[in-house]
């Protein structure tokens, strides 16, 4: 996901604004693969990365005479998403055929929901700085994924191959209202949605594996206008940073076009992460072109009210609510709380550790400054490490008690996380226990003072900050192990 830094966009600082006199309207469509064992209408396994065309049945291959059977668990996950996002679950819905020709779509149509999807309405809460908003949803519907065309020359020697492993994988498509007002809001919306789907165990939402894919529909209009402008659909937005940059660029392109007397055409544009620009794709079909009609092979979907209530009763606390609780009850800053709530596993770990230790803010600081960077540098998830919430609480406790300096603790953190050993034991073995023994520190302090008579004079002449120089020297001589509080008290005594 490396990006070339380019163009005038100022998204990194959050300072981007649309050109004077213009406002932005965005509606997002998200396709999220459901975490099911088998596909939406067949028993073929839903696995990523298997050898091409090995995860298929006759149903996924579109062979004649076969019949699709809906996957009950896929419906359960879809309903869970709807209930969690405050949607109205329809007790009666239909699967329809959406016709188009593409080599990765062997049936010549995709089974989707059209006029009567299983879910309507709903809200996705977002937080931007101190502003809370909820983005309204139009609908969520279920559909099957298509296969994949493989253009990789190294694999196919210049030819294009078709891999149907993905064909038939269960998806939900979440469609927002055109109610998102800035690129930053679009990114916040997608983050919030992804966090919720992950908390709910609905989808892994791994953007690199394509199980959370977003298209952003973008239009512009003169400030205060009530009619919507013509929308352009941006595809291929495979990271949240690109979403912001692509929308910013698209807004600028549309405004320039209109101001130069041109007109925006309704089309699909593909974001190219290497050039940082979009290029035109196909002109967008109207719904009529798809010749939708109810799939005669599938009975209407009935979702019983009792089942919906059972699913509702078993929902976990959602990330947005949890973030607000961390801020309100534990006193965390909004960015820290947001970061820790992105993944349920992380939030659970933090919460347990904070409970054991007692000072949530201190533990949050260790999460942000040590746990997360360690995970990032090892490229691992918390569940893949033997590190426990008890370890973290113990380590932070040892720092509090002055048994180890914060610097030493941070230094061995990665090793600790990977070894799963008790912090006190590991620190002892590495000889990193803090030197707080005043007799030992006094010896070192005397050496430092003797070696720097000029600084001693400065200090005595009233330059109090010279004390920090001495503290630094002593810490250096102990290779970071001296407990700063003990050093300070020894120095103050010697210099008095
Ligand atoms: P399609 O699949 O044909 O793109 P959908 O109805 O699934 O159509 O999705 C349309 C998306 O475009 C919705 O998210 C909607 O909010 C958004 N949208 C519609 N009109 C506009 C507009 N003028 N400007 C921005 N977004 C729009
Ligand atoms: Mg759509």
Image (cartoon, rainbow, N blue to C red):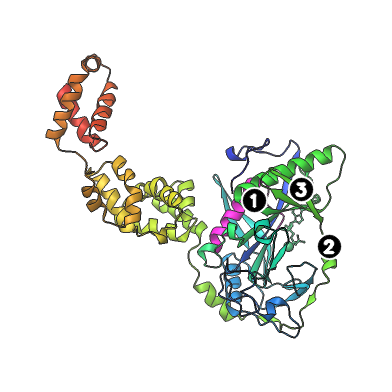
- Which numbered marker is on residue 107? none
Q: Which residues are magenta?
A: 176-197
Residue 320 percent location from the top left of the image: 52, 57
Left or right, 478 with respect to 331, comes to left
User: Residue 179: horizontal and vertical position, in percent?
Assistant: 69, 53
Q: Which mark is residue 186?
A: 1
Q: Residue furthest left?
A: 439
Within the displayed image, which quadrant is ligand 2 positioned in? bottom right
| Whole-number angstrom distance, CA of label 1 to CA of label 2 | 25 Å
Tell me the SS state at disc 3: strand
Q: Toward which corner of the image does residue 445 lie, by quadrant?
A: top left
The residue at the point 26 percent across, 45 percent down is 400
The residue closer to the viewer here, 415 or 239, is 415
Residue underneath mark 3: 279
User: Does residue 268 sit above or below 490 in this rendering?
Assistant: below
Image position of 440 with respect to 215: above or below: above
Q: Which residue is mark 2?
A: 286
Question: Can residue 354 be seen here?
Answer: no
Q: Secondary structure at mark 2?
A: loop
Marks 1 and 2: which is nearer the front? 2
Quick one: SS at disc 1?
Answer: helix
Which is closer to the viewer, label 1 or label 3? Answer: 3
429 or 201, nearer to the observer: 429
């Amino acid at each position: 996901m490396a990006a070339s830094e380019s163009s005038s966009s100022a998204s990194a600082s959050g300072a981007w604004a649309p050109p004077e006199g213009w406002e932005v309207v965005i509606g997002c469509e998200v396709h999220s693969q459901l975490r099911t064992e088998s596909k939406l209408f067949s028993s073929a396994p839903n696995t990523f990365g298997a050898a091409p065309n090995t995860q298929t049945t006759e149903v996924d291959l579109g062979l004649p005479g076969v019949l699709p059977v809906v996957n009950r668990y896929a419906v359960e996950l879809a309903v869970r998403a709807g209930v969690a996002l405050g949607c109205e679950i329809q007790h009666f819905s239909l699967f329809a055929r959406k016709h188009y020709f593409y080599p990765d779509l062997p049936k010549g149509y995709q089974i989707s929901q059209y006029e009567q999807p299983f879910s309507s309405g709903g809200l996705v809460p977002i937080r931007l700085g101190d502003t809370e908003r909820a983005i309204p949803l139009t609908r969520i519907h279920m559909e099957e994924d298509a296969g994949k065309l493989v253009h990789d020359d190294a694999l196919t020697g210049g030819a294009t191959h078709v891999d149907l492993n993905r064909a038939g994988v269960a998806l939900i498509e979440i469609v927002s209202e055109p109610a998102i007002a800035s690129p930053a809001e679009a990114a916040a919306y997608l983050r919030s949605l992804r966090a919720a789907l992950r908390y709910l165990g609905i989808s892994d939402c791994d953007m690199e594996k394509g199980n959370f894919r977003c298209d952003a529909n973008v239009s512009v209009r003169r400030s205060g206008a009530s009619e919507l402008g013509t929308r352009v659909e941006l595809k291929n937005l495979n990271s949240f940073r690109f979403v912001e940059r692509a929308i910013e660029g698209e807004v600028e392109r549309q405004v320039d076009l209109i101001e130069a007397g041109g007109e925006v055409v309704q089309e699909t544009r593909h974001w190219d992460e290497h050039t940082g620009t979009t290029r035109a794709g196909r002109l967008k079909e109207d719904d009529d072109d798809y010749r939708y009609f109810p799939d005669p092979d599938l009975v209407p979907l009935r979702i019983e009210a009792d089942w919906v209530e059972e699913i509702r009763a078993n929902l976990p606390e959602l990330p947005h609510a949890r973030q607000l609780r961390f801020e309100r009850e534990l006193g965390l800053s909004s960015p820290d709380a947001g970061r820790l709530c992105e993944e349920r596993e992380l939030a659970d770990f933090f919460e347990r550790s904070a409970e054991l230790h007692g000072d949530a803010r201190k533990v949050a600081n260790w999460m942000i400054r040590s746990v997360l960077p360690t995970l990032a540098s090892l490229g691992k998830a918390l569940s893949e490490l033997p590190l426990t919430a008890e370890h973290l609480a113990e380590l932070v406790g040892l720092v509090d008690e002055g048994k180890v300096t914060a610097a030493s603790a941070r230094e061995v953190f990665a090793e600790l996380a990977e070894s799963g050993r008790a912090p006190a034991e590991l620190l002892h073995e590495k000889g990193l226990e803090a030197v707080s023994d005043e007799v030992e520190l006094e010896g070192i302090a005397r050496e430092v003072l003797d070696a720097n008579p000029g600084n001693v004079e400065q200090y005595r002449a009233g330059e109090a900050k010279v004390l920090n120089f001495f503290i630094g020297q002593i810490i250096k001589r102990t290779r970071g192990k001296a407990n700063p509080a003990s050093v300070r008290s020894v120095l103050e005594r010697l210099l008095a």
